[in-house]
Amino acid sequence: MTKIIEIAVKVIIYGMFFAGVWLFFGRYLLRYFKKSSRYNKSGKDIKNKRYSLFMAHIRLVLHLSLGKSKDSNVYIFIFISAFIFLLSFFILFSLFSSGLFSILVAALLGSLPYIILRVRLAGLQLEGSYEAESLIAELTNMYRINSLNMIAAIDGTIFSLNSCPHSKRSLFHLSLAIKKYRNTEELQYGIDSFVASTGTEWARLLGMNIFESVVSGTDVQVALDDILSELKEIKSIIERDRRANNEAFTMVKFVIPAVYVLSIYAANKFFGFTLHKFFSYQFSTALGIKFFMVIIALSIISFGAMFILRKPKFDY
């Protein structure tokens, strides 16, 4: 109990320290963020931004998962991740005096914001992939109605996709990108973002056809019909795999907590541990706390994998 109180006091102290640092320097950082985000208003060429691969990746993940794409959002996200890492490292090092363990666990905790975003993005991509048939069927119809005008077809599809919120949002951003683009690189960036919103093969093929139609005016009716017919063929296979995965993951969901409960029972039954002794070793010793943290980390990873893989993505 004393150990838990000591940890709580250290968390409060470190939290107050970093909060004070933020209050003192925060206004200067925000001022810098606002200056660096002005490109969103000026519409500068994407290539001139010279993002590093890391920054571009974080920006894309934030845009797809939260709809945030400003430079300030990227820097704030990195600051929060670094703050969690440093706070966790100082607390863990003061508790265990183990540099390697503290760095590894702090790195895991510091990466939690990114992991949460990726899990959210995976969920959005998964739900969006099941809107494929409605999206492509409606886009094909609008393409024909608007005399093979892809831009008008996209705008018409946006207003009629009331039952497909993910595709509607992605098409809206794509429509803005198409109307603002000044060269093929900017158009390709907008289409790549649209494809990444579902991360599927059918979206990649659809993006290629949209690009060709917008840039060169190519008639892509046949290609759109082919994509739609292939999606209809695999629909039954996807549904069968989805039912099988749901049954398997339902079992695993109950097995993971049961294993920990059974470990308490086994310690009591076969090794003579009382409940008080078990929890004393678990939460009052450095080794016990380390072991419990590993259990929590592995459980989070397991449940995250279950969340992502509970049903297959609707794709070829």
Image: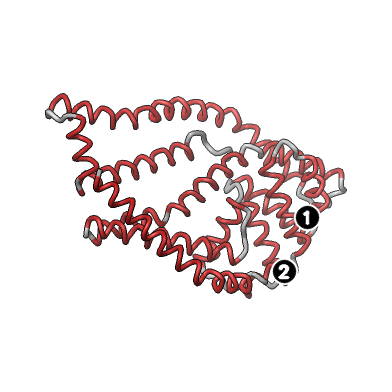
Residue designated by label 1: 218
User: CA gap, disc 1 to disc 2?
Assistant: 32 Å
Which quarter of the picture shows residue 227?
top right
Quadrant where the C terminus is found in the figure: top right
Q: Please, what secondary structure does the residue beneath circle 1 have?
A: loop
Residue name at image x 42 percent, y 27 percent: 248
Contact between labelled residues 2 and 1, with CB atoms less than 8 Å apart: no
Instruction: Specify the amino acid type for callout 2.
Output: Lys
Q: Who is closer to the viewer here, 195 or 52?
A: 52
Q: Is residue 291 found left or right of 177 in the rendered image? A: left
> Percent position (x, y) of residue 155?
80, 49
The label shown at residue 41 is 2
Q: Give the x, y percent position of residue 135.
A: 71, 41
Kindly identify the residue that appears in the image at 29 percent across and 48 percent down. 5
Q: Looking at the picture, does residue 130 appear above or below residue 60?
A: above
Percent position (x, y) of residue 22?
48, 66
Few, some or many residues within 10 Å of mark 2 (<14, 14–19, 20+)? few
Q: Nearer the viewer, residue 151 or 227?
A: 151
Q: Residue at x 61, y 50 (%)?
A: 197
Residue 299 percent coordinates (x, y): 36, 39
* Front one among 27 and 101: 27
